[in-house]
Amino acid sequence: MGLWPLRLLAAALTPVLALTGCSYAGRHSDAAAHNCRTLAADPGWYGDNRERIDAMITRLGSCGKAESATASAPLALFDWDNTMVRNDVGNATFYWMINNSKIRQPAGGNWSTTSAYLTTEAAAALAAACGGLADPGQPLPTGSNTSCADELVTVYTRHETRSGASAFTGYNRRRIQPGDAWAAQLLAGWTDAEITEFATAARKQNLDATQGSGQTVGSTRQTGWVRYYTQMRDLVGTLQANGFGVRIISASAEPVVRVWATDIGIPADHVMGVRTDHDGDVLTPRLGWCGGEPSMPFNEGKRCRVNEQLFGVQGAAAFQQSPEQRRQVFAAGDSDGDVSFITDATALRLVLNRNQIELMCWAYANADGNWMVNPVFVNPLPMSPPYPCATQGFDEPDGGRAPLRQADGTVLPDQQDRVH
């Protein structure tokens, strides 16, 4: 995994000096002298996280420096769902499409064509619930037919059928999240412009909804709201104002995330999400490739996409950690699906605490002093039991759990949840 090696305890205890070479106060004075933008004071920032980020921005950013010294913009990468916003925009769009009857009957009525990872049992269950409701290629009446809607929702959210059979199989758990991939694959049959319309409508609905509210999808109750984090909006703007290149790397469908990211000043071509191939101007269920295989931005798949798209690394090497000079300086995320690209960041790594075992094990171990943990900014989670890093900290490709090992092979000890 190319994970960071252990450093001396003294270095871990003095991350600020290691990062900046001087005090936070000195860095803020330098930024103020040049009228450089810094992060707004906000009680949502935990401990000295804001000061540490400002110090990194002052050290690596372009403000107040000669152009020749900052010819190559430092790269900052952000996950989207539950990192830039509270809740999941992929979920929001999927539920909107079901309630508005925008999921199409697959070719030949064969649900196996919608995902290579869908089990025979799941394909049969979907055919039984949705077959005969629409001709192949036509929208299904999921806004009124609760049986079809419920089967879709159950497969998507629980990765099983309503009868309890496993819905997905045959995928690498460190590179594919089959439910998220499937949500993108079910956009098949629509153009990018049409999907933009759907995502825009879903965005409005979820921003207008009362915080904490739910919605009925089929006969199920699902989360019905999304909120931008004001702190992360400010962070993106501050990074951009200081010459950083800011991009999104998300496991939600790329056309969907583009709609949401525009509002915080991130252009469409700076959003990396799940891609599916086109047939003319219409989307298909075929996943795009990375590293020589069907892929999506999930864990090692996020690293692959960044390496391939931004740094030109081709083939299987894109799944491996690149040399330090060819990596992002900053990364932020909240889930185990973010472990690889956050680990790759060379200066600072911001983790929003959603009690994800592998990610929180690395963050709390903080071997090189460059990890920061912050509670999520809206509806923070309560304290988690100790994270079982020494026994279940690593997600195996086959779905098993194993001890989380550091670069030298030693097992990372269990970690207490300290920031919540």
Image: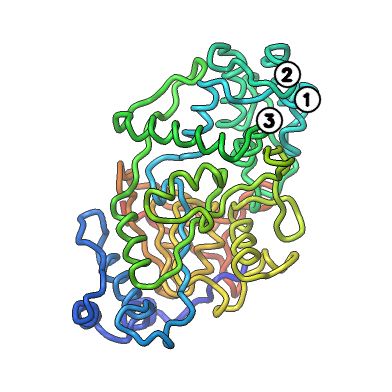
Label 1 belongs to which residue?
A: 110
Image x and y of residue 33, in percent: 19, 81
Q: Is residue 94 above or below residue 256?
A: above
Image x and y of residue 61, in percent: 37, 77
Q: Image quadrant for the N terminus?
A: bottom right
Q: Return the mark for residue 166.
A: 3
Which is in the foreground here, disc 3 or disc 1? Answer: 1
Q: Earlier in the sequence, mark 1 or mark 2?
A: 1
- Specify whether residue 360 is in view: no
Q: Is residue 187 above or below residue 110?
A: below
Q: Tell me: 352 left or right of 33.
A: right
Dot 1: element: loop
In the image, 313 versus 7, the foreground residue is 313
Mark 2 closeness class: few <14, some 14–19, many ≥20 residues within 10 Å: many
What amino acid is labelled 3 in the image? Ser
What amino acid is labelled 2 in the image? Ala
Q: Earlier in the sequence, mark 3 or mark 2?
A: 2
Q: Earlier in the sequence, mark 3 or mark 1?
A: 1
Which is in the foreground here, disc 3 or disc 2? Answer: 2
What amino acid is labelled 1 in the image? Asn
